[in-house]
Amino acid sequence: MSSYAVPVLEHPPTLAADEVYLIASGDLRQSANKVCWAAQAEVERKVIEAFTAEGIKVRRANAYNAELGHGFIYNQRMGMDVFMDIDPKAPIIVAEAVWQYSHNVFSGLENHRGPILTVANWSGQWPGLVGMLNLNACLHKAGVNFSTIWSKDFDDDFFRNGIRQWLKEHRITHDDSHVHTWDVASIAKAEKELGEALAKELQQRKAILGVFDEGCMGMYNAIIEDHLLNRSGVYKERLSQSALVAAMGEIPDAEAQKVRDWLDQRGVTFVTGPNPETDLTDRQILEQCKMYISAMRIANDFGCNAIGIQYQQGLKDTAPASDLVEALLNNVERPPVFDAKGQELYAGAALPHFNEVDECAGIDALVTNRVWTAMHLDPATTLHDVRWGEHYKGMTASGEPIDEFVWLLQISGAVPASHLQGGYAKAISERQPSMYFRLGGGTLKGVSKPGAVVWSRVFVEGDRLHVDIGRATAIDLPSEETNRRWKEATTQWPIMNAILHGVTRDQFMARHRANHLNVAYAPTSELADRALDAKAAMMAALGVVVHRCGN
């Protein structure tokens, strides 16, 4: 008789009716987890206190790790092991006060059969809101049922009523009345014809997204499956970040110095120091200049129309940050790069870069570039993290009254100079925070200029591409208010203070399918409306489902 090694699996304990689990996804970088733990622990304390007041006992699914100095789930394997001990039908809370890698907990949540609630604190200190939106977007793409809510102190009626509904009904109802089905037929003839012609051209003369490694930071929502992307006429060229590092090693210092000289001549202020562990050094800047040249040449070699560098995994251990590089690529005016024959690459044009290899942002940037260029507008575009925001009542820097909720949108340096007040001349480059960027490198820091903005987000839903699109206004707040907000977030990074037209804070948070949103400027509100229409027409003609958000 045969004797087989049949695995015997233990069933996780069943929770009582008045109990729920709590987990927290963290960063792959233990330095970030350790620094951010105090804020996370405080959020968990408040969340547990709120549920206790409702007669619910909260069980933490994994213990605090004294050796590491935090209690986060910090990689995919750990997440799988933690979920092995969780009752698959039990209610579970994912509480986030920090940026987190969604794949740490994604496999467990994707297979979880009990009610799921994602929670974030309304704070700009660490990117908890960004992390929660990313996890929400990953779950949404996968078709996982979940509820979500956010709060500053976890004692307001919005939060209390929300968790009561979740405990009773296993769902939280949010207002989505700002989302409208797009009637493409209502678009003016000129913009409709332009969008459709550009779509036809893209599908005939296909385009390439150069992807320097895929799936950054577990952002499943940022990956577009090939069969969906290819329908639009866009294909991926899968590139390796190791090739980028190898190419950097072939760039002479003298050639990289020309890029630095170009930036110095245009007035960029580099805040440098002698200690590479804590300061931005001239050597780090030179390496970033080499990355810029190498990225341009690789993109040209493969005929790429846009590129995305992952950086946060792999490249972070071999080179300074890519963010200064990304900012330059996204701008029409930038240091010239030449091929071996002396031909300038992408002359007089931006090479759109999608930060963190967010492919949804990549196709969005490509479409924006085509529409804005055809309309003779500045095609510089970027994505921002949905970082935080507050209601502001007072005066703008130009003396106009304002009484609105103003978002603080922020990304780690990929903002093009033409988006900033004063352009290159007012831009500052500071060292990236050590806990995220061990090898340093500079940002391109500044305050986004006031003006008319089109915002958008491409996402995957039901095996189709969708896009939310709307209008916004970038606001020039008084310097003291801008600096106060900067200190609430990350001071080294560029920011945009923005009002989203016809979309409240809670409507946006409940609906948004990403941690990122794309932005592009137009010189007037009327031109921004027309550009939005042309972009919507192009997206629709490419087979993308278009949703108009707000006014």
Image (cartoon, rainbow, N blue to C red):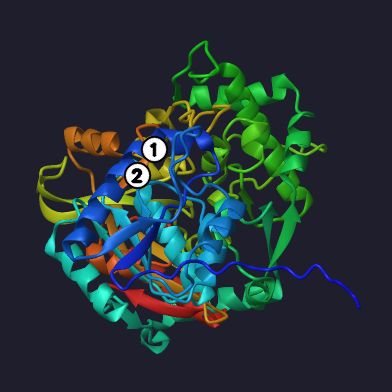
Q: How many marks?
A: 2
- Asked whether residue 62 is in view, the answer is yes
Q: Quadrant of residue 427?
A: top left
Residue farthest to the top, as pictured: 274
Q: Quadrant of the C terminus?
A: bottom left
Tell me the number on the disc at residue 513: none
Residue denoted by label 2: 40
Left or right of residue 448: residue 313: right
Q: Nearer the viewer, residue 34 or 379?
A: 34
Amino acid type assigned to the residue bearing label 1 in the image = Cys
The x and y percentages for residue 402 are: 11, 52
Residue denoted by label 1: 36
- Asked whether residue 363 is in view, the answer is no
Q: Residue at x 61, y 36 (%)?
A: 316
Q: Residues within 10 Å of mark 1 (few under 14, many from 20)?
A: many
Q: Residue at x 28, y 77 (%)?
A: 176
Disc 1 to disc 2: CB gap under 8 Å: yes
Q: Quadrant of residue 23?
A: bottom left
The x and y percentages for residue 117 are: 35, 67
The x and y percentages for residue 224 are: 61, 68
Between the residue at mark 1 and the residue at mark 2, the CA separation in whole angstroms equals 6 Å
Q: Nearer the viewer, residue 2 or 264?
A: 2
Q: Quadrant of the N terminus?
A: bottom right
The x and y percentages for residue 351 are: 60, 50
Question: What is the secondary structure assignment of the residue under circle 2?
Answer: helix
Q: Residues within 10 Å of mark 2 (few under 14, many from 20)?
A: many
Q: Residue at x 36, y 57 (%)?
A: 59
Residue farthest to the front, as pictured: 1
Amino acid type assigned to the residue bearing label 2 in the image = Gln
Left or right of residue 292: residue 239: right
Question: What is the secondary structure assignment of the residue under circle 1?
Answer: helix
Left or right of residue 362: residue 512: left
